[in-house]
Amino acid sequence: MERQIQQLRESAAKLIGAATDLKELDNVRVKILGKKGELTGLLRGMSQLSAEERPKIGKIVNEARAQIEQLIADKNSELKAQDLQNKLASEKIDVTLPGRKIHCGHLHPLTLTLNRVKEIFINMGYSVEEGPEVETDYFNFEALNLPKDHPAREMQDSFYITEEILLRTQTSPVQARTMQKNPPNTPIRMIAPGRVYRRDDYDASHAPMFTQVEGLVVDKGITFADLKGTLDFFCKQFFGENAQIRMRPSFFPFTEPSTEVDVSCPICHGKSADCKVCHGSGWLEILGAGEVHPDVLKMSGYNPEIVSGFAFGMGVERICMIKYAIDDLRMFFENDVRFLSQF
């Protein structure tokens, strides 16, 4: 039996040394040391030995088991270290390689324009006010001097939800809401940017949803000259120092007197008859404005004998198209990356 044990030692050492991975090594362990392994079989055969031989053979078997277990443990550590080295080699990163460029998005041209408009007016001391897009008929029309039977309501086809609820057609309701939430005759200097909705066709110059910025100033001694100076300053800041404005008489129910405001063409500056932006006129309409109608002040709790004010409203899409010489409104909404990446 001593010879069998020695042969088993030598065979086990060869098998363990030849193992190339942990699974193969475990198979060798089971083959030799498992419940049905070769060494276990030798132990069962000790029952046939004499009483004098059993202690001697038992000691040899235990020494063989200890030696084989040590060989397996050493080989296990070796294979694990080899696996780790292989894994590190396969996952090696060359830190000297240039990094992958991450493609970052950017602000939409309408957002860029709106942010610039806000910045200009905030620097002039204006607050930014907001209001609901789903508005009441009272704030959208009646509080702005447009009673239910007023013919000017036909100028704005509206999306009505009920007879008294609609999608706002302008951000002017925010002006009325701001005046009514303040104590009577409180000075106001505010702009109200936001989305508005009208039943317009969707084409190169119209959309059923667009963005407006309304402005309101109310205080003692506010005159039409203050309005002109404010709008002239805004246009120079937005379109450039060479920008000029002109005012033409107009009509709005909530202002009196009222005016349409044009800005000199920022593309050709009125010097090209072939300009595709102003079509050779040299001027572009950008907003409507006027002194706040006394009835609008009264309905919001202000006394027109004490205070006066001016209001204006501009379409963000329109001034964005003028600034960047864009000739189709639909480009703002079609998410064409070729167009958007230019900004």
Image (cartoon, rainbow, N blue to C red):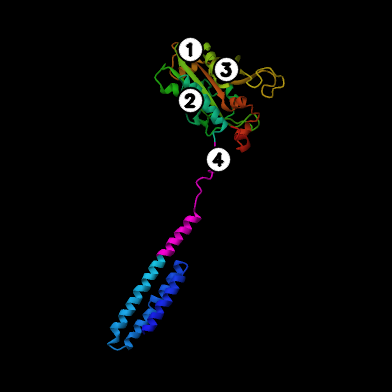
Please say whether residue 196 is visible from this viewpoint.
no
**Residue type pointed to by label 1:** Ile
Mark 1 secondary-structure assignment: loop
- Cα gap from disc 2 to disc 4, whole angstroms: 39 Å
Above or below — where is 246 with respect to 277?
Answer: above
Q: CA distance from mark 1 to mark 4?
A: 50 Å
Count neighbours of disc 1 (C-alpha within 10 A) and say few if under 14, some if 14 to 19, many if 20 or more: some
Q: Let me know if residue 88 is in the magenta part.
A: yes
Image check: 36 left or right of 194? left
Q: Is residue 212 magenta?
A: no
Marks 2 & 4, CB-CB < 8 Å contact: no
**Residue found 31% across the figure and 81% down from its top:** 58
Q: Residues within 10 Å of mark 3 (few under 14, many from 20)?
A: few
- Please tell me whether mark 4 sits on a helix, a strand or a loop: loop
Tell me the distance, in whole angstroms, between the alpha carbons under discs 3 and 4. 35 Å
* Residue range (magenta): 77-105
Mark 2: few/some/many CA within 10 Å (<14, 14-19, 20+):
many
Residue to which mark 2 is pinned? 174
Q: Dot 4 corresponds to which residue?
A: 103
The residue beneath circle 3 is 241
Front: mark 2 or 4: 4
